[in-house]
Amino acid sequence: MAAGYLDILRARHAARLLTGTLVGRLPNGTAHIAIVLFTRAEGGSYTLAGALAAVYGLATAVGQPLLGRAVDLYGQPRVQLPASVLSALGMALLAVAGLGSLPLAYAAVALAGVFTPPLEGGLRALWPSVLGSEERVHRAYAMDAVAQEIMFTVGPLLVTLLVSLWSPAAALLVINTIGVLGALSVILSEPSRSWRSAPREAHWLGALRSRGLLALLGSFFFVGMALGSITVAGVAYADDHGRESVYGWLMAALGLGALIGGAVYGARQWSGPPERRLRVIVALLALGYLPLMLTPGVVAMTVLAAVAGVFLAPAIACSFIVVDRHAPRGTVTEAFSWLVTTFGVGAAAGTAVAGPAVELGGTSWSFAVAGAGGVAALLVLLATGGILAAPGHSAVALRGPEGDRSGAAEPGLSPGHQA
């Protein structure tokens, strides 16, 4: 397991790109947590906290595909750098202005969300030119998912640590400053500066003209909904038990479970179509969310949170390969950005629903939103099985397209590839 990941990290630029992307995504990965804690510290209700987090998620949903398409057209540095700075300025405005003017608070989180840089999709576009073989690229997808879970494990703890040492406002400022530095590390790297997307067919729908991609996005909307609802439900559970630190431990346990699951998933090669495998993984993911409604004591709840997270990273890693198989040529960053967007919209819906659910029915109701989201994600995959069974294109990951000055094409698999 470790040998395969070390092989990837030894590749030139790989460690820098992975680390820089994770650090650059820290503001986005912790935004919902930071916004909820900031709002509660300022005296705002759960509903307001959920609404602000929802606006951030929706704004991210709008910005990611637009910025992703811009990256495909104009390259990474010209888009990623200004976007990261503007996003950080939006969160800084929220931290400084507070909730005294709600329109200004909503505008601040919207600005931060719209300009969240598409670093995640950008990294996956860079892997083929950096790693040199499809097998290593696929392992990098799994490692990427595992590394994200490290961020989602450490991120909540870092936010709660900054809140306890200083304040929620300081946490917003520090996290977003770190994020800009991470994005800058990626943007200044040689692979990012030289990368160009494969030639693309002019079409106003871009990546969304793929029916298979639309089916995948429909499912992962509900996965995002489940995760977004847990953000609010976890805070409510911590309030019920009178300890703010409980929230950080629950989120860290969720991330730790996903980290373990992703590491095991990426350690082996899988046979059979990834679309079929994804259905099984999402079914197990849904099964893990349902027991959270029991809301037992802190120790048992932490264990349940860890179990609930085990199949998250495998689901994400498998979805990356499915995106490869269904995204139209020349839309790599945009296609992956749509996946991020789907999570953003789903998470926004989850936080928006979970807030009132806490106030109407208590903490168990908010965790029920997560369980319902997991089940709905599975139902979408089952209903669209025929569409997902037929990949829409056959891209060759390592063939440099005409006009690709770096010699790196978008990552892609042939329809018969066995993941």
Image (cartoon, helix red, strand yellow):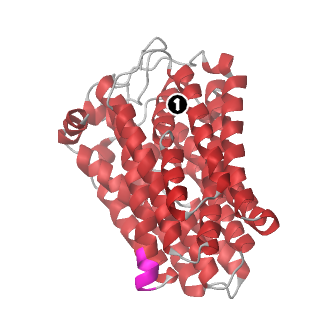
Magenta span main SS = helix
The residue singled out by tag 1 in the image is 323
Residues drawn in magenta: 161-166
Does residue 382 appear left or right of residue 1 in this picture?
right
- Pick out the residue farthest to the top: 416
Q: Amino acid at mark 1?
A: Val
Instruction: Determine the residue positioned at 20% across, 34% down.
Output: 3
**Would you place residue 92 above or below residue 269 in this image?**
below
Instruction: Determine the residue positioned at 60% across, 15% down.
Output: 390
**Would you place residue 384 above or below residue 314 in this image?**
above
> Which quadrant is the N terminus positioned in?
top left
Q: Is residue 164 magenta?
A: yes
Q: Is residue 186 magenta?
A: no
- Pick out the residue farthest to the right: 360
Residue 365 point in image, percent of width and height:
75, 57
Instruction: Determine the residue positioned at 45% across, 71% down.
Output: 159
> Which quadrant is the C terminus positioned in?
top left
Looking at the picture, tell me which residue is in the foreground, 45 or 171. Answer: 45
**Would you place residue 411 above or below residue 69 in this image?**
above
Q: Identify the element where label 1 is drawn.
A: helix
Q: Give the quadrant of residue 406.
A: top left
Residue 327 in view in this figure = no
Q: How many marks?
A: 1
Q: Give the quadrant of residue 234.
A: bottom right
**Would you place residue 335 above or below residue 415 in this image?**
below
Looking at the picture, tell me which residue is in the foreground, 120 or 305. Answer: 305
